[in-house]
Amino acid sequence: NHWGVGVGSALMSTVLEQLRKDSYPEAILWTLENYPRGQQYYESMGWSRDGGVRDNGTQIRYRIRLGVLSDS
């Protein structure tokens, strides 16, 4: 019942905004390889799969470039 109501997008936006404020040039995340719903969500938020894998290929890595926000 809680899928698609915007909580995840609000959390993701808040985290990415803070990373930008803290001058991080990019962020990475790991997700399950067999999780198409999650992968579609991350891609819709601007994340790109970069080919990284771990845990015998069960996890895949996504990356997003961050524009740095100024304090003004």
Image: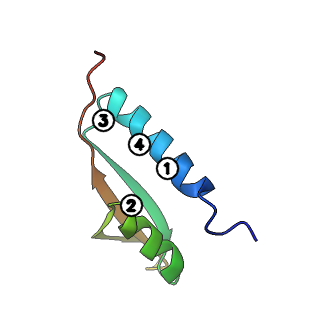
What element does badge 2 sit on? Answer: loop
Write down the residue under mark 3. Answer: 24
Position of residue 22 measured from the top left corner of the image (x, y, whole percent): 36, 27
What element does badge 1 sit on? Answer: helix
Asked if disc 4 and disc 1 are in contact, CB closer than 8 Å, the reply is yes
- Residue type for callout 2: Met
Q: Is residue 19 above or below residue 3?
A: above
Marks 3 and 2, how far apart in space?
A: 17 Å
Write down the residue under mark 2. Answer: 45
What element does badge 4 sit on? Answer: helix
Quadrant of residue 68 within the rendered picture: top left
Marks 4 and 1, how far apart in space?
A: 6 Å
* Of the image marks 2 and 4, the number of the one nearer the N terminus: 4
Write down the residue under mark 1. Answer: 12
**Total numbered badges shown on the rendered structure:** 4
Marks 3 and 1, how far apart in space?
A: 15 Å
Write down the residue under mark 4. Answer: 16
